[in-house]
Amino acid sequence: MPYVVAATWSFGLKAVSRAAEILTLNGNALDAVEEGIKVVELDPEVLTVGLGGIPNLKGVCELDASIMDGYSLKAGAVGGVRNVLHPISVARKVLELTPHILLVGDEAIDFASKLGLTVSEFTWKKGALEKWRELLSSINLGVGLQPYMDKIKAYIEHYRLHETISVVALDRYGNIASGSSTTGLPLKIPGRVGDSAIIGAGVYADNDVGAACTTGVGEIAQITLLSKNVCDLIRTGLDPQDACEKAIENTFRYKYYHGGIAVLAIDREGRIGAASSRKDFVYAYIAEGMDKPKVEAGVYVDSSEY
C-alpha cells in the first residue's frame, strides 16, 4: 500500500518530509508521526509548538501532546508538562509503558524525568517572550478574575496564534496513526489543557477507518470531539473531505466557544481531507511517488451560513 502523510500548517512541510523518510524505509506510521512532530517541536521559528514557545498567563511554558495508534487503538497523552523538549515522545511512552492514556502536570513531568526526557534548562525561542508581553499588554487584565475572563474570551475569538502541529500518517502496511503537539493557547490560564492532549478531540486513529487531527481553539475540538467525529463520519461512508467539512459545520452549534478551528484527515485508502472555519488554514502533505511535499489550502466553511 502506498504511504501518505499530512500535517497542519506550512511548517508541517518539515514534519511530513521527516515522516516520509521513515515511511520510505518501510517504517511504521506511529514512528513517522512522532519523528515528524519532533522536528517542529525543535523548530526555532515556530512559537506555538515546543519548549520555549509562547507561555501561559504567568509566563510559564506548559506543553500538551498526544499520539494514537490505529492498529492497536492504544493512545498516550500528556498535559501541562514543563521542561520537556519532546512532549510527543513522552506521550508515546505513556502509550507504550503504562495502562493509562493521559498524564498531567507535575506527575507527568516526573514520569518524563525518570525516562530521561526532561531538561534542567532551556532557551526561549526568539520572539516568544516579546510576543507574550505584547499580547499581555493588549488585554488589560483589570481587577479580579471576571475582567480577565471577558477580555480573554474576546481575544480568543479573534487571535491568530494557535498553530498546533498535528500529523496523520498511513504506512505501507496499512497502519494509521495520528499525533499532535503544542504550547497551547497563548495567555491561557495556568493548568488549562487543550485538545492536543485529548484523544478524540485533537487526535484519533483507527485502521478500519482512518485518522484525524486538529488545530485551532482547543475548546471547540474538545466539546465536539472533532477528530473522533470526522472518523465516525468516514465510517458512515463519507470521503475524508466531506467528513471534515461536515464536522466543521457541526462545531457551529456550540455558540459559547469562539475562535478558529480546523481538521485534517486521511482514510485507510490514503485520501486526504481538510476543512476549517478559518480562511487561512493550509496543510502540507506527501504521498508515495511524489518528488517533494506540497502545501494546499483547506476548504473554508463559512460559519455565517449556519
Image (cartoon, rainbow, N blue to C red):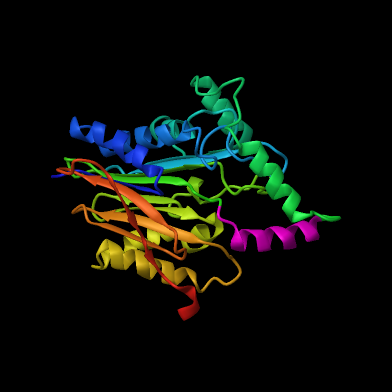
User: Residue reaching furthest right?
Assistant: 143
Residue 151 colored in magenta in the image: yes
Q: Residue at x 50, y 55 (%)?
A: 216
Part of the protein shown in magenta: 145-160
Q: Residue at x 46, y 66 (%)?
A: 277
Can you say whether 195 is above or below 128 in the image?
below
Q: Nearer the viewer, residue 168 or 16?
A: 16
Q: Residue at x 57, y 46 (%)?
A: 184
From the viewer's perspective, is 293 left or right of 160? left
Image quadrant assignment for residue 125: top right
Q: Residue at x 55, y 50 (%)?
A: 194
The answer to whether residue 15 of the structure is visible from this angle is yes
Residue 30 colored in magenta in the image: no
Can you say whether 282 is above or below 63 in the image?
below
From the viewer's perspective, is 69 left or right of 40? left
Residue 106 position in % (x across, y down): 63, 32
Q: Nearer the viewer, residue 47 or 57?
A: 47
Residue 275 position in % (x across, y down): 38, 63
Residue 137 position in % (x across, y down): 75, 49
